[in-house]
Amino acid sequence: MAVVFLISSLLPASAQPSPILDGYVREGLANNLALRQESLEIKRVSESINQARSLFYPRVAFNPTYSLAAGGRRLQFPVGDLINPIYRTLNQVTGSDRFPTNLANVDEQLAPNNFHDTKISVQYAIFNTDIQYNYLIQKQLLTVQEARRRVVENELRYTIRTAYYQYLQTLDAIRIYDSSRRVLTELARLNEKLVSNNVATKEVVTSARYEISKVDQQMAVAEKNRESARAYFNFLLNRDLAAPIDIDSSLTRILPEQKEALADLQQTALRDRQELSQLNGSLRAAQTAVRLNEANATIPNVFVGGNAGFQGFGYTFRNQAYALAQFGLQWDLFRGYEKRSKIQQARIQTDALQTRLQEVQRQVQLQVVQAYYDLDAANESLAATQSGIANADATFRVIDSKYRNGQSLLIEFLRYQNDRLTAQLQHSLARMDVLVKRAALDRAVAVD
């Protein structure tokens, strides 16, 4: 009956270390593709922080331009027509040629031709609320993304553990079916002897073989379930789907059960659940956004800058040097109440996140309560199936002895054999259910 006690009554998984399973969990956390995506997302947000930090430094740019132009608008002014007659009159009055009388009219193309502006530009924000608060928001969003990754880790731990337990259960089911088949095969041999000795008729042999064929069918389904469970477990670990899985024999030991207080578990969940950390980070970012919009409405932005370079016609750089320094202040005094609306919008977002945080806290407490009592029910069910399998096994031994001595009918033997098989399967499922429910409680409490 050793097969019956595979995965027996268990200490809670958090209190029962399993080196093999813990190793698989670590492997899954290192290799799982979904978790890798979350790690890449954290790196992306980290680069956003670097970009926000870069805005605190001066901006230096080299901006050479060269223009060629033809056609377009022109600036025309009759300078010669206006001034030349005046100068001729002055020359006549003074009796000299001191004033030129050949001034040309102005006819210049507005778009500069063969003109260059080669300069280095510097700009530095002395005080800019957008830059300061955006940097804070990006740092807070990084904590949100890190919390999200830990949420995925917690879920992945639960999924890997339950997949491992399900794989163990399929092995247990195969062993139970194999044991049942051996019993039925022995029954068929016994019935063949009874028929050959004219103690029984041929239907006892065909009935036994029919029962064997039913077990073979169930065995085929169990083997299919085993391969599916193996493939799913390996998928979670990002391994070859047909890779072998080590079995942890420590999970078969009978260990005392440990009970934690429900209130303590709830407090632990409220402290450690990363969903709450994620929402708290989002709430802090929203509160920073409120301060950003309030600062934008009341505080101006101040900056300094300048240009230095060469400017003129033709790339000669001779007598073309220039420098320009700037000091600027930007302060939007009125924009149609847009800033007031943005402040109100940010406050509404903060209130929504605060409400969501309270809701999730209640949901976490509810999840712990449900998982706690689900585990209690699973333990009670396991105890009931343990009693049932003991009774079914004792009854079968009596019927087996009576049948061998000709004191019982074949139909009774098969009935109690099927009852025993059903009890073993129920007990196996109940043992697996205890493991799964404990894993669910660990997930609700966020136990590593």
Image: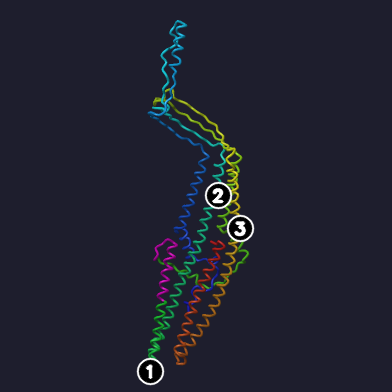
Percent coordinates x, y for residue 307 in the rendering: 48, 30
Would you call the spot at circle 3 few (<14 residues within 10 Å), some (14-19), or many (20 or more)? Answer: few
Magenta stretch: includes residue 161: no
User: What label sits on residue 140 in the rendered view?
Assistant: 2
Q: Which residues are magenta?
A: 219-242
Q: Amino acid at mark 1?
A: Asn
| Residue closer to the observer: 402 or 15 | 402
Mark 1 = which residue? Answer: 198
Q: Nearer the viewer, mark 1 or mark 2?
A: 2
Picture residue at 46% right of the left edge, 71% below the top: 168
Q: Earlier in the sequence, mark 3 or mark 2?
A: 2
- Determine the CA span between mark 3 and mark 1: 79 Å
Q: Residues within 10 Å of mark 2 (few under 14, many from 20)?
A: many
Position of residue 157 measured from the top left corner of the image (x, y, whole percent) = 50, 62
Q: Nearer the viewer, mark 3 or mark 1?
A: 3
Q: Can residue 166 be spotted in the picture?
A: yes
Q: CA distance from mark 3 to mark 2?
A: 20 Å
- At label 2, which amino acid type do we have? Gln
Earlier sequence position, callout 1 versus callout 2: 2
Secondary structure beneath label 2? helix
Q: CA distance from mark 1 to mark 2?
A: 87 Å
Q: Is residue 139 above or below residue 261?
A: above
Residue labelled with disc 3: 358
Within-10-Å neighbours for mark 1: few <14, some 14–19, many 20+: few
